[in-house]
Image: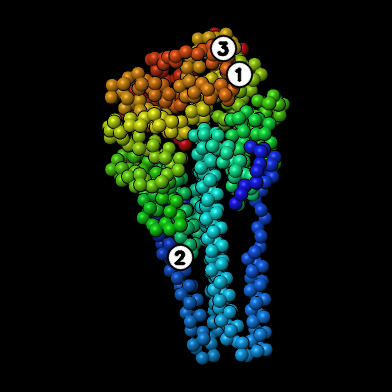
Amino acid sequence: MTPPFASATTAISRVRRDLTIGSLLKWLILGGAGLVILLEPIVQGGFGGTFILMGLGVVWFVLSARSARGTQLAVGASPLIATGQFDAAEVQLNEALQSFSIFRGAKLIGLHHLAVLRHAQRRFTDAAALSRALLTQRLGTLESLSKPTRLILAESLLETDDLRGAYEALSGLYKMRLTLNEAVALLAIQTDYTTRTGAWAEVLSGLESKLQLCELMPSDRAAKTLSCFALALKKTGRPADALLQQRRAELLVAPAELVASRPMFKELWPDASSVPPPSK
Amino acid sequence: MQTPSVPFLDVQTLIERSHPRPRRRVALYVLGLAVLGMLLGAYISAEQPAARRVVEGLGVVMLVGLMIGFMTTGMSAVSALKAEAKRIESIEELVQLRRWEQAALELNQLLSVPTRTPGARIQALLYLSSVLGRYHRFRDAMTVQTELLDTVDLDPGTEHSLKLGLAIAMLREDHLVDAGRVMAELKRESSGESGGLTLVELYRDVRTYHAAEAIELFHQKLPQLRRHLGFRIGDAWALLAWAYDAMQLPADARIAWANALLLQPVEELSRRYPELLTLAQKLAGPVYISAPVSADVAPTRAEGGVA
């Protein structure tokens, strides 16, 4: 078994190196094949071009098969992460990222899933670094990865208190067409961001539709977002509405957990004892 | 393409007609014809040297035509696949947003003809079972769920959700023994760590008038319900309110009902659980927010509340 990546930096440099070698090799094979096709009719008596072409074909086929295996491993990590099997996902992604691939796709998908894994493990610094590294790459046909990656980046930066970085990641998303699930995730991150910057009017704009979207979130995310609304309502002099959202939030997650995750919620639950949130 | 007329959401027809067509090997036939053409060209060239230039010209035209043909076919196949995936995605969003009518129309149309991929068919059938549940067509929902469970190798998460839906449908149809069997399977597979299963168990207790057990289960599994159900924990509060009411604990029932209504609209609750209709009428009126807010929002059980 290959040893796991010690840090995000190691994984990123490994992926970058593999991408360079992979594309170099790909162009060498294609260039070689092109040269053989061009030169074979010119050279007197030929030079066994057919055999060289066949050899290059076999090499291409073998490398493609290896790349496909890498992609399969990377994609297979997704359900493992979703079901909380982080160790198994780690092993699988490790194998995917350390195996050689001639195509960029396998490496980029692997890097994306590693960012998802680190985010799920609440290793936000690593998740942010991996997401940033992925977004600097030319994604091509994998452009669809950019939206979830930006969402992970924005949330991870918020968790590490980098509000400016989170704003930059979020602003890129406003120009994109999002699916419902992505819009829901964006709402949670955006509300967290605007609450932390004290932009109460922004938090409360379009509150009714935001509350509807909130109902599609998982418990912890919904509770955090409702608490942000409650705080904004309290700050803007609407205590009854604030209490309503506060009550809804505490039905979803225990107040102590909410206060532990965001100390600013202490204003809503001054008596909630701060206990660390359960590890995911 | 004209969609053949299908009675609205006729489950059997939709299940049968939605099977993806086996791939036609058109490309192989075309390639075979091309090889035949090349052999014929070589034969003609050998027999009639004068026609050689014409044959070579035709050969080039044929090769270019083949390349363009394969590229166009490939591109149109990819765009058709993308369009189907987009349709499935939009149906998923309609179901999430509870736009049942639109979702039903889309599903009826999509499943009336063979889908392009087996994956799209499976997803569409999963959404169909939700829509059928919404329209209280539980027998039909069970048919779809059983079809998927029997014929498709699903990932564990999807299988779990599907079995939860099946158990609910069975309870609604009073197939209590079958529901019990499915719930036992779910319990074994999830090692008891499923908020969805707890909700189904609560409903079974309500359905079979085991109010005390429902109260006991709710309090025992509240942290799990909170973790797993999101806003659907409102359903659990509503079922708890029913149980308290059945146990003649009106104050507790009122608190639990108020909590339920903070998370779910009364219409949705009564639609999902017809047993709650009487309670909804009984407790109709403005919802009061209890204050002060404590860390544990569960109402304390009155003495003798749990058998």
The residue lying at 47 percent from left, 68 percent from top is A26
Task: Identify which amino acid the numbered label 3 is placed on.
Answer: Asp
Q: Let me know if marks 3 and 2 both belong to one chain.
A: no
Q: Secondary structure at mark 2?
A: helix
**In terms of depth relative to the viewer, which is nearer, B24 or A237?**
B24
Task: Identify which amino acid the numbered label 2 is placed on.
Answer: Gly
User: Which subunit holds the residue at mark 3?
Assistant: B
The residue lying at 48 percent from left, 82 percent from top is A38
Task: Identify residue for label 2.
Answer: A22
Residue B193 horizontal/vertical position (percent): 57, 31
Which mark lies nearer to you, 3 or 2?
3
Which mark lies nearer to you, 1 or 2?
1
Q: Is residue B295 above or below residue B148?
A: above
Residue B141 horizontal/vertical position (percent): 65, 34
Task: Give me the disc on residue B275.
Answer: 1
Asked if residue B307 lies left or right of residue B254, the reply is: right
Task: Give me the disc on residue B245.
Answer: 3
Check contact, mark 3 vs mark 2: CB within 8 A. no
The residue lying at 38 percent from left, 53 percent from top is A135
The residue lying at 59 percent from left, 12 percent from top is B246
Q: Let me know if marks 1 and 2 both belong to one chain.
A: no
Q: Can residue A116 be spotted in the picture?
A: yes
Marks 1 and 3, the one that precedes in the sequence: 3
Q: CA distance from mark 1 to mark 2?
A: 63 Å
Q: Quadrant of residue B72?
A: bottom right
Q: Secondary structure at mark 1?
A: helix
Task: Identify which amino acid the numbered label 1 is placed on.
Answer: Glu
User: Which subunit holds the residue at mark 2?
Assistant: A
> How is the model colour-coded?
rainbow
